[in-house]
Amino acid sequence: MGGRESTLVLLDENGIRCDGRKIDEPRRIMIKAGGLKNADGSAYIEFGDNKILVGVYGPRDVHPKHMSDTDTGILRVRYHMEPFSVGERKNPAPSRREIEISKVIKEALLPAVMLEKFPRTAVDVFIEVLQADGGTRCAALSAASVALADAGIPMRDMVAACAAGKVADTVILDVNNEEDQAGQADMPIGYMPSLEKVTLLQLDGVLTPEEFKKCVEVGVEGCKIVYDLQKKALNEKYFKNGGDQ
Amino acid sequence: MTSTVIDELKKSQILELLEQGKRIDGRALDEPRKLTVEINAIPKANGSARVRLGDTEAICGVKIQPDRPFPDMGDKGIFICTAELLPLSHPSVETGPPGPDVIELARVVDRGIRESHMVDVSQLVIEKDKSVVGVFADNVVVDYDGNLFDACSYAATAAVLKSKLPKWEMKDDVPTLVEGEESELPTTTIPVSVTMGKIGKHIIVDPNGDEWASMDSRITITTDSDGNIVALQKGGDDGFTVDEIVKCGELSIKAGAKIRETLKQAGEGSQ
């Protein structure tokens, strides 16, 4: 990128972060269920400056056929970033990073979705990152859960996700782009609050065992905040206005 | 979009209605669908627009960055427009490399804007033969209900029209960003594409998804602010008579003029 000043203060003496947040404060989060006409289920999330659209199709026939499973349905997830979503234009073809994120998001959703009810079918989750600003996988996973619920697919719980991390030797909630670039650790967490189960966990950075424990705890608290907003989004679509479509 | 029994039934209904001068969604034959344009939907891009044409929705983001000029065009900047059909836009869209339909879409949208000389590439040179400014207008379709040509074209035009051009200067042979020196992206005209479908003997403007699946052939005509025709693409399995083509040209100028005003006014007063 270049141009970024190296004097960026990640945490000032009053415990205020570079974007004005407190250490345990998430960014502004807005989740909307529905919105796409053709998709069986959809959701839109704004998580700080992240803007992500998710569409779900299924359960439906599996193409190619050899992928289908006679015992259970299958889940397929594509995480994709638009060329204009990041600072420098991104090649539209899927990168290795996007393929890995697609896989970890799929594995984070699998424990929640009751695919065994739909043998020989596929549920497709398409995640489109319109604008990225650090923490897209967490925002995408949170929105994907809402889109799956919007599609009416039976689920054991919704997966809520939020990252914890470390900047200036302090554990913080919801790592933004600057903190991810210049900070010491970033730990995205996906969590099913009702089942109390972590389904996505990654870390890059250095943490002491105490900091690690603290990070997981802080992250899980963040997930619970996101979880309430996920439920609110579904509630607004299905109960407040009698559904918007 | 593959044809089903339902499509065949719809096709006969659409044709029956057209015989009475009516369309399946109640529009006049020369009436495009409602167009809404949201400017600056992606604040991190240099320009962006989210466009809804009926139930077809496209998002265009413009990225502007230094680039090497094409070998024979050292005194001109670069303008490239792409279009992609995202798999969440319709159940029949699959992931993977684009098929011929999507490649045609991207090329027709690009050609319409390029051939109108909307972006004044002669003003996008940082140092002749060495470094120029590249303008990338990337379209993605997120909801499908026919006529992606016009939806993408309007999204790209609206986004380009309101794009901000950063300034670069050569320092030690490297283009270097000059902070705080943004200007309007130099544009010369506002191209507007109008796509028409032919079903039986009838010509309809801006076919929706059902009409798109039923039509025999189509024609996309792009006009500029001066009322010239700057690009054209015929598609589909049937042909047009010369009279029909002339009529389509007139329709594209008439329908295009109204859309041009919508695009021009989009985002005014919101910034």
Image (cartoon, coloured by chain):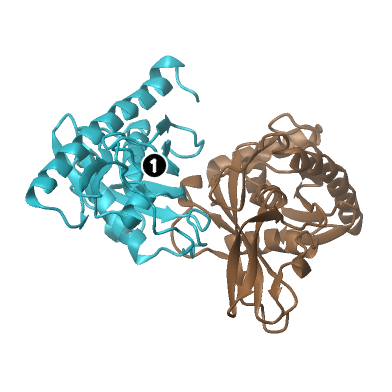
Asked if residue A111 is positioned above or below residue A230 in the image, the reply reads below
Quadrant assignment, res A223? top left
Find residue A14 and report its horizontal and vertical position in percent. Answer: 30, 36
Q: Please tell me which residue is depicted at 41% across the width and 63% down the height of the picture.
A: A94
Farthest-out residue, front: A13
At 35% across and 23% down in the image, what residue appears? Answer: A232
Q: Which residue is at the front of the view, B156 or B171? A: B171
- How many discs mark residues in the rendered view? 1
Mark 1, residues whose alpha carbon is within 10 Å: few (<14), some, or many (≥20)? many
- The answer to whether residue A56 is left or right of residue A223 is right
What amino acid type is highlighted by mark number 1?
A: Val
Residue located farthest toward the left when viewing the structure as drawn: A209
Q: Which residue is mark 1?
A: A56
**Chain seen in cyan:** A
Report helix, strand or loop for mark 1.
strand
Residue B46 locus on image (x, y percent): 60, 53
Residue drawn 81% across and 47% down? B201
Q: Is residue A210 above or below residue A43?
A: below
Residue B261 can be seen, yes or no? yes
**Depth order, front residue of B62/A194:** B62
Q: Chain ID for label 1?
A: A
Q: Is residue B87 above or below residue A161?
A: below
Rendered brown, the chain in question is: B
Residue A155 seen in the figure: no
User: In the rendering, at what x and y percent does residue B54 appear?
Assistant: 65, 36
**Residue B27 pos. (x, y %):** 75, 32
